[in-house]
Amino acid sequence: MKIHSVTPVRVDAAELTRRRARYRRLSPPGVEVVLEDGGPEAPPQFATRDDIETSTSAVTEALAKASAEDYAVRMPDCVLDPAVPVTPDGSAVPTVGMLRLTASHLAATGTIFGAVTRNHIIGEALAERIEEYGLGPWFAGVAVLDLDFDTIPDTLRWNEAVRGALDEFAARGVTAVINGCSAVDTGTPHPVQLVDPAERALRLLAAGAQA
């Protein structure tokens, strides 16, 4: 299975290389992710609602321009699922969202889940997506970490910040939390499962391809 993906923000060569290596590490056997930069029209980061809207337009355009011949699916490199239609559009190469796949899987198993995000803007957009997908009854809300964009490749800093949020979710009886950034490695030992949406989505797509 070959998956086409596009970053939601402009990234430099080093960060694109890091993200590509991460996908190679996460991909199950038989799955290949072809990741491309979002291009000059993509925002440098998600700091405002306009950034998210600009990113959605840039990702939509980038996916539409790419040849669909070799791909089984398209999946944006973003937990906000930019360019992912709420209702399937019948495209020969469907665009699927890692948030939708991950959250739907958790809900299907009866799991009440939360999420952590870097800032409030991302948190609000993620919560809106969950509602659009009809998964609100299983959603325990978002904890905002208040981290800057440069924290994304810094696994240690991110996971240190996440620990306090997981403690709060645990006190509420929540057992799973979606990591609200598709480009961060999750490595925090904790009774609450910190779910990597990219890893979970790839695993689910691989299982579906084999069914």
Image (spheres, rainbow, N blue to C red):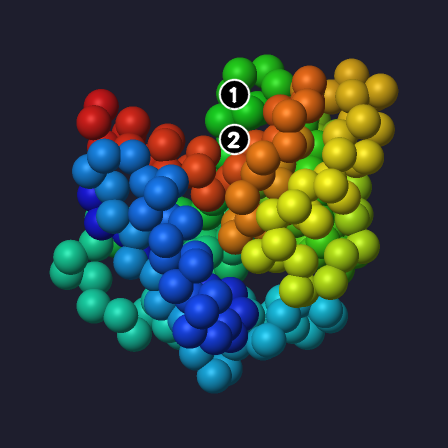
Residue 147 coordinates in the image, percent (x, y) = 76, 57
Quarter holding the C terminus is top left
Left-right relation of 54 to 67: right
Q: Could you give the CA–CA distance between mark 2 and mark 1, rounded to whole angstroms?
A: 6 Å
User: Quarter-wise, where is residue 116 in the image?
Assistant: top right
Amino acid under disc 1:
Ala
- Of residue 190 and residue 102, the one placed in the foreground of this image is 190
Check disc 2 and report its element: helix, strand or loop: helix
- Of residue 140 and residue 32, the one placed in the foreground of this image is 32
For the point 48% across and 75% down, which residue is it?
12
Left-right relation of 131 to 92: right
Identify the mark at residue 142; answer none if there is no mark.
none
Residue 36 coordinates in the image, percent (x, y) = 36, 67
Identify the mark at residue 104; answer none if there is no mark.
2
In this rendering, the answer to whether 204 lies above or below 88 is above
Q: Are marks 2 and 1 in contact (CB under 8 Å)?
A: yes
In this rendering, the answer to whether 161 lies above or below 210 is below
For the point 43% across and 59% down, which residue is it?
18
Residue 70 coordinates in the image, percent (x, y) = 15, 57
In this rendering, the answer to whether 128 lies above or below 176 is below
- Of residue 128 and residue 39, the one placed in the foreground of this image is 39
Identify the mark at residue 108; answer none if there is no mark.
1
Residue 122 coordinates in the image, percent (x, y) = 70, 56
Q: Is residue 140 visible?
A: yes
Quarter holding the N terminus is top left
Check disc 1 and report its element: helix, strand or loop: helix
